[in-house]
Image: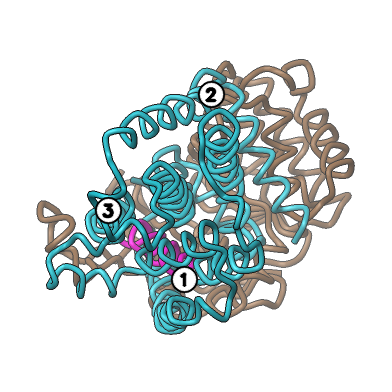
Chain colours: A cyan, B brown
């Protein structure tokens, strides 16, 4: 398993390094986003938005956590689908299917570079926001953050598998990740607490996994809540994972069968 | 050893095609049917026939890229539909087109990568990549991006990739299509050596009847998705005569 995963990671690193400007921009973009969020945050007085108090009362910390977390999990969800789409467009997908590498290993290896870059971006968000700007994470509960991260990953892996199955079946760009990202930005509380939404949208937000992930992340990172205090959102994330995983496995199985049945390897 | 029994493939539109591909025709295409073959270990076996005869479809089924619609096929004892992973361990495929590479990476980096996918650790992958490049006379271009290769060089690189895992079965789809005469002769020498000295089974689809005569022990003449006849080489142009007799009217 190690050799194919490393081979896929190295391939993606080599391909990315042939376009260093694009690679540098992925990091630089964070350098522009953090100050933008900081100056935007100076316009917002916590006293004007009581619902921010639950998240520590500081809009800058609130929004940096929201944007960095949402960006990372959107990248995680779309990584495998994007990799498959690139192989379809490049004509290499057929070649990969002849290899004896198992599909879970192929999916992991193909996503790894994207995940490393997304994790690097998230880390850069935190470092820049904490060192240069006044993001307050002094009370962060690392155990709480780790447990929420694990539960969120367990939810987003099947979502990523569903996106990959969509691309395999329809040989079209991944619209699932984009759609869920748009819904999440609206409902999940990336830029504002979901409590500012009308009641009907607040209820709808409870069906969006990122709502629970962000709420739990903020409570663990800002207020220092531990796993026990976060059990409501953690439970919701695990229910999402338990429901989505069998559906995603079935979707991938059907999609792969259909690819080999129809010979649909290219875009 | 490769066996197929009444092997067939019909391409049908998926039920959701009306949503995703509204301009695609509704017709099913029967690309292969009733193909029964037995290819011995260490044999070089040819697939000849006009365009659309079913040669590539047959090779793709043997490579597990396509699921058969009817019949069975076994490669080295493994069923292509149910034991795909075992089949993929036993084969090396060089497809007819030259799109299966990362054009921004060098030939060496491409082969390093594919050897890694076969499960070889980095140092072993590199050794195998260099060996394969040397075998196909590509070492001088090893560090050039594949995008700068000629079609013939990419074709040789595809053959080199098929050899990376030392598979007992090699499937070649028009392996000399883009090669110059010298490189084509080099391929024929290599294929003969792979079969006779190394005991590998080689199945190659080709339009070049002279090449099939020179290289193969037997060849199947395909037309319209069926195996019309299996011809043993007699060294006196028997394949070409039978091909013309069977297909002359339709060619």
Can the viewer see residue B228? no
**Which label belongs to residue A155?**
1
Within 10 Å of disc 3 (Cα), the crowding (few <14, some 14-19, many 20+) is some
Could you tell me which residue is drawn at 89 percent across and 41 percent down? B123
Rendered location of residue A182, percent (x, y): 25, 52
Label 2 SS: helix
Residue A202's place in the image compared with B138, above or below, is below
Could you tell me which residue is drawn at 71 percent across and 45 percent down? A7
- On screen, residue A201 versus residue B235, left or right, reads left
Q: Chain of mark 2?
A: B
Can the viewer see residue B8? yes
Q: Which residues are magenta?
A: A156-171
- On screen, residue A137 versus residue A173, left or right, reads right
Rendered location of residue B12, percent (x, y): 25, 68
Of the two numbered discs 1 and 3 on the same chain, state the one appearing first in sequence: 1
**Which label belongs to residue A175?**
3
Q: Chain of mark 1?
A: A
Counting labels gives 3
**Label 2, label 1: how far apart the Cα atoms are:** 45 Å
Residue B176 found in image quarter: top right
Could you tell me which residue is drawn at 34 percent across and 51 percent down? B52
What residue did someone put label 2 on? B151
Q: Closer to the observer: label 2 or label 3?
A: 3
Q: Do the dots labelled 1 and 3 sit on one chain?
A: yes
Residue B90 found in image quarter: bottom right
Q: Chain of mark 3?
A: A
Q: Is B199 included in the stretch rendered in magenta? A: no
- The quarter of the image holding the N terminus of chain A is bottom right
Residue B79's place in the image compared with A11, above or below, is below
**Label 2, label 3: how far apart the Cα atoms are:** 35 Å
């Amino acid at each position: 398993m190690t050799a194919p995963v490393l081979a896929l990671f190295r391939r993606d690193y080599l391909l990315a390094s042939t376009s260093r400007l694009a690679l540098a921009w992925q990091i630089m973009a964070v350098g522009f986003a953090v100050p933008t969020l900081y100056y935007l945050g100076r316009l917002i007085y916590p006293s004007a938005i009581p619902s921010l108090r639950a998240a520590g009362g500081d809009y800058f910390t609130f929004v940096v956590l929201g944007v960095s977390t949402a960006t990372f999990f959107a990248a995680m969800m779309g990584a495998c689908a994007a990799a498959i789409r690139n192989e379809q467009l490049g004509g290499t997908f057929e070649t990969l299917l002849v290899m004896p590498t198992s599909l879970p290993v192929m999916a992991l290896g193909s996503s790894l570079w994207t995940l490393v870059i997304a994790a690097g971006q998230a880390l850069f968000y935190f470092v820049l926001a904490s060192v240069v700007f006044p993001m307050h994470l002094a009370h962060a509960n690392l155990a709480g953050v780790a447990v929420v991260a694990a539960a969120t990953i367990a939810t987003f892996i099947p979502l990523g598998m569903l996106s990959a199955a969509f691309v395999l079946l329809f040989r079209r760009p991944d619209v699932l990740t984009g759609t869920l990202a748009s819904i999440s930005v609206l409902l999940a509380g990336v830029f504002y607490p979901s409590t500012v939404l009308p009641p009907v949208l607040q209820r709808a937000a409870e069906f969006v996994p990122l709502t629970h992930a962000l709420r739990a992340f903020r409570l663990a990172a800002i207020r220092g809540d531990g796993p026990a205090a976060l059990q409501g959102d953690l439970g919701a994330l695990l229910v999402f994972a338990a429901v989505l995983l069998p559906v995603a496995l079935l979707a991938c199985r059907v999609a792969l069968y259909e690819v080999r049945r129809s010979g649909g390897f290219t875009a | 050893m490769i066996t197929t029994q009444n092997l067939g493939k019909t391409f049908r539109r998926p039920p959701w095609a009306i949503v995703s591909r509204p301009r695609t025709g509704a017709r099913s295409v029967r690309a292969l049917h009733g193909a029964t073959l037995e290819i011995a270990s260490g044999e070089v076996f040819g697939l000849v026939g006009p365009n659309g005869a079913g040669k590539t479809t047959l090779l793709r089924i043997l490579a597990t890229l396509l699921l058969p619609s009817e019949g069975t096929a076994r490669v080295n004892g493994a069923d292509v539909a149910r034991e795909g992973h075992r089949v993929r361990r036993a084969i090396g495929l060089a497809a007819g087109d030259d799109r299966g590479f990362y054009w921004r990476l060098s030939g060496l980096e491409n082969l390093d990568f594919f050897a890694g996918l076969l499960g070889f650790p980095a140092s072993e992958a590199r050794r195998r990549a260099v060996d394969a490049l040397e075998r196909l006379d590509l070492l001088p271009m090893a560090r050039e991006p594949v995008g700068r290769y000629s079609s013939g060089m990419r074709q040789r690189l595809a053959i080199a990739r098929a050899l990376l895992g030392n598979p007992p079965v090699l499937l070649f789809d028009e392996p000399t299509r883009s090669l110059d005469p010298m490189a084509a002769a080099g391929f024929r020498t290599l294929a003969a050596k792979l079969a006779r000295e190394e005991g590998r089974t080689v199945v190659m689809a080709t339009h070049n009847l002279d090449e099939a005569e020179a290289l193969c022990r037997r060849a199947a003449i395909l037309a319209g998705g069926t195996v019309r006849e299996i011809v043993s080489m007699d060294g006196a142009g028997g394949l070409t005569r039978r091909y013309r007799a069977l297909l002359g009217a339709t060619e």
